[in-house]
Each structure stands twice: as C-alpha cells, then as structure tokens.
Amino acid sequence: MNTQSSTMHESFDAPRIASAISATRLFYWSVRRELWENRLLYLAPLAFAGVFLFGFLISLIHLPARMRGLSALDPAQQRDAIAMPYDIAAGLMMVTTILVGVFYCLEALHSERRDRSILFWKSLPVSDLTTVVAKASVAIFILPLLTSAIGSAMHFIMLLVSSAVLLGSGLSAATLWTRLAWLQMSLLLLYHILTAHALWPAPMYGWLLLVSGWARRATFLWAALPIVAIAGAEKMAFHTSHFAAMVGGRLIGVAPGNASTPDDIFPTNPMTHITPATFLSSPGLWIGLAVTAAFLIAAVRQRRYQGPV
Amino acid sequence: MSVIEARALRKTFGATVALDGIDLRVERGRILGLVGPNGAGKTTALNTILGLIPYQGELKVLGRNPWTEREQLMRDVCFIADVAVLPRWMQVSQMLDYVAGVHPRFDRAKAEAFLVTTAIKSTNKVRELSKGMVTQLHLALVMAIDARLLVLDEPTLGLDILYRKQFYDSLLSDYFDCSRTILLTTHQVEEIQHVLTDLMFINGGRIVLACSMEEFESRYAEVTVKPEHVAAARALKPIRERAVLGCSILLFDNTDRRQLAELGDVRTPSIADLFVAVMGNQAAQAQGAA
C-alpha cells in the first residue's frame, strides 16, 4: 500500500519541480499578513505616544524651575523627581500592550471567519498550525517588542527635548542623563514588557485566541463570561477569590521577580532589582506556558473544523 | 490514475444527510460540471475534496487524503469559493507578495501580466474593487498558480454577463490544458454547456446522472414534434414534454435518432432542460413512493 501511494505521488510530481516552502518562510509571511491586517498593533501605541509627548512638551515649561530646586534633594529623591514622567511613559506602553493584545487576540481568528476570507487563506498551502502560531506570536512577541521599542523611542525623545530646554535656559543637562540612563531604562522596559506583559499573561492570550476561533459573535462576552462564572462560583462555594486574583494578576502583569515593592511597578528605575532566575524558575510561568500550549492546540483544531461564520 | 477518486463518500450534519454515499472518479484533463438544486450537496462535496470538512468513506485527491493533508494538497489545488472571499482590507500588491511568499508554484509575473489587462491597480484595496474586479483578481491569482486541479464553486455568481463570459474565456484559452482538471458548480448551466467535458447531476446528496458530454449528446435528444405526430412521439416514452408556442417539445433518453427524425426537428437539448426533466421525474417518483 505504501509503495503504491508513493508511486502515485510521483506520477503527479514527476514532470514538475517538487518544491516546498520552508516552515520559517510560511511563518514569516503569516506574521506579515497579521501586521498588514492589524495596523492597530503599531498605530495604537504610536498614537498614545504622540498624545503623551504633546502633554510632556507642555509640561517642560516648568522644567528649568524644577531642576533648579533639585540640588536641595538627596540623589534618590532627585531621581524620583526627574523620573516621574518617564515612569508614566513606560506605564502607558504597558497598558497599551495589554489593551492592544487583548483586542488583537479577540479578533485574530474571528475576523477571517466573519468576512469569509478564511476560505481564501485555506486555499493556500499554509497549515492551521502555522496560522495560529503566527497569530499567538504576534501577541506574545511582536507586540511587546513594538511597544517597548516605541517606549524607548519616547524616552529618548523626552530626554532630547528636555536637554534642549535646559540648555536653552542656561542649565546643564548632565544630571538628566546621569540620573536617567537611557540604555538601561530601555533594556529594563523591554525585559519587563516581555516577561510581565507577554510571557506571564500568555495563557490569557491563548484563551482569547481560542474563543475568537470558536465564538460566532460577541467574542469578548464569551471570553469574559466563563472567568466571571468561575470566580463567582468560587466566591459562593468557598468564600475565596483565588481564581479572580490569579486571572487579574496575569492580566495586569504581576509576575514573580519583577517588582521589588508593590509601589515600584514601573521598571525604569535602574535600582529596580530584577531577578530573571526567580521568574524563570517560578512554576507559575511554566504552568502558564503549558496552559497556553493547550489553548493553542485547541485553537488549531478549532480552525481546522470551523468554516466561515 | 484519477485526479479525484471517491468511494461511498458520506457526510452528515446532525440528522441531515448532505452526501449519501457518492462514488466519483475524475480523470486528468477533464472539466466536470456539478449541477444540482440548492441544498443538493454540491458545496459539501467540494468542501470534502478541498479538505475543509471531515467525511466518511474513501476519498483521494491527487493521491492524497484531503482532510489530513490539506496544506500539501493546496500546492496542487486551487479553489475559488462561491462568493468573493478575498480579504477586503488587503492591497493588491500585498496579495501578490503574500501568495508569492507562501505558494511554491505561483508565477508573479503571470499574475501581473493578467492584471495589466484589467482596470485593477496594484495599489487598490480589495474593498475598493467591484465584484467583477474581485473575481478578476482572484482569477489572476489562480491562473498564475501551476496547479493540477482547480475547483470553482459558483465562481460567477452575481457577475454581469460580460464578466461571466470573460471569466470562462480566460479560463479556457489562457489556463486550461490537458494536464489540468477543473471541477465547477454553477446555476448558470446554459453558459457552461460548451465548456464542460463531463456532467454530473446531484440531488439530495446522491448522484442522479453522470456522463461525458459526448455521451450526453448521443444519448439525449430533444424533438420539436408536429401536432399530428404527438401521439406517436409519446409512445416512445419521452422523459419530458413541454409546450412552446403551440408546439410540443419532447425530450428522449436513448431513443433511435432516425425514428425521432421522422417526428420533427431533432437537436441536442440544453443542460438546463435535461436538468429540469431529470429533477422533475425524481420529484414525481418521490411523490409516487410517498
């Protein structure tokens, strides 16, 4: 039977160049397709960044006065006083990552069924696995990379403009650059967004992708209802709220080994003590990733069986 | 070696039987038209062949199992589904980039050469194109793919007659050759009569009629019978009789042509007329049985 089927394949392929496209190339084009379709992925963070920078520019009027009053403070207080807008900028990018990630995932496997274009995508030699993995990696890797890059660019522009203002009023910009080490801030931001807002909430993204491939409409409702129901049932039965706390923690990115104190959730402070080992060795991370994989496998299976809505 | 080979192909949706044990064999170089009323199981049959839905029974397309090997199969199979399914947000140039990126047998230059003959610009988004232009774009993509099997499910639905004619002309003159195979469904049967090499009627999930167009032409005859010969003609057991402008037109299956020629003008019926005759008789039989 085997020999027979292999000769059957040959008889069709023989006069043609039997060329297959590598998995990486299929993956690359699947990701590009996502970036074309969902321009929100970079337009939303850029728009937030633009609005914030505009506000920041206006606030610069008071900068020379603030810098003059700075010398009375000790170095840690100096840093806190200067760093506040930078922390807010970083926090804004984190919130953007969460918001865009959630809405992207809820649409990712739904819009192609709603506009029936799934029939076009399925007419091409790209597997359901490649498609789902590409969509998941847009939420878990591409989006965090984009938002942290935009966040770093924001920081850089803020530093440049502040320096210009300070120099213009006859002050030195050196304090600014020494108190706010740009490269270090950028790396911390990247690390924080990738760990706390991508890998840690990955099971949530997996769940949202699964629901978006399954629900016929109202994806947000179907995604939220079971969570509310389980949390409610737990509260009624045991008077506890572990499940709600867990989901909430994943959503806002309370990952182990990231923040030293509850007040210090913004990672731009170079004094922030990050402990990648704690993060990587926490069972919560690996259990979460296993759950993500399970949700994604279910989503692949779902896409295989699902036609247009 | 057949392009499509199905044995006892069956598909049910809950209690509804969409395909009720179909045996099908399509050879290379054929253009098979699948004709049936709405809900007959045409699209279900195509979906099983394209690996879009699971099924029971045996099915091999180009020697592969479509359900388990869809993505490999899609290197050699193209399809255009019943309505415009190209993503509306996509730009024409992006679409060419994407298909060139993922399809090993896509010839971008060929697609661009076809698009030059249309009003479609590479900067257009699909949502800016008219329905006819979207079909042209899809046709340009499909014709630039060196596939073995092309499946068309109502490809010209909702298009005006100019686009419809152009569609089949392009397909026949620029695309089809004896190494390719086309499987298509449409309700506009009169327009594809000259295109097909094989014909299949499907109803209630079963094949009602399957023949090549040569068989079709030798087997079925339509006669405009003069009033004085109507009784004699009826004695030859026509499968359908209709009256047009006072003349009786009778449709015969496997009846001696010389005998028919004595009764009036003999010609090959249209697929549409045969379809009505076959489906009408089926309905009558079903009523008789009930």
Image (cartoon, helix red, strand yellow):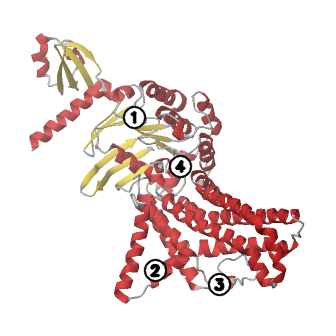
Q: Earlier in the sequence, mark 4 or mark 3?
A: 4
Depth order, front residue of B60/B101: B101
Q: Chain of mark 4?
A: A
Which amino acid type is shown beneath numbered disc 4? Answer: Leu
Residue B222 coordinates in the image, percent (x, y)? 24, 20
Observer-nearest residue: B134 or A67?
A67
Q: Nearer the viewer, mark 2 or mark 1?
A: 2
> Helix or strand or loop: what does disc 4 sit on?
loop
Residue A271 placed where, x, y %? 75, 83
| Residue B179 visible in the picture | no
Question: Is A305 above or below relative to A71?
Answer: above
Where does residue B24 sit, x and y in percent of width and height? 35, 44
Mark 4 and mark 2 lie on one chain; the one further toward the N terminus is 4
Q: Secondary structure at mark 3?
A: loop
Contact between labelled residues 1 and 2, with CB atoms less than 8 Å apart = no
Residue position marked by numbered label 4 in the rendering: A124
Residue B137 visible somewhere in the drawing:
yes
Res. B157 mark: 1
Q: Rounded to the nearest whole Å, what is the CA distance between mark 4 and mark 2?
A: 41 Å
Q: Amino acid at mark 2?
A: Ala
Q: Chain of mark 1?
A: B
Dot 1 falls on a residue whose secondary structure is: loop
Q: Nearer the viewer, mark 2 or mark 3?
A: 2
Chain to which mark 3 belongs: A
Query: Gap between marks 4 and 3, in whole Å?
Result: 44 Å
Residue at x 52%, y 72% (from the top left corner): A293
Q: CA distance from mark 2 to mark 3?
A: 21 Å
Q: First in sequence, mark 2 or 3: give its number.
A: 2
**Residue bearing the label numbered 2:** A244
Residue at image x 59%, y 40%? Answer: B92
Q: Could you tell me which residue is drawn at 69 percent across and 84 percent down?
A: A275
Left or right of B283 on screen, residue B221: right
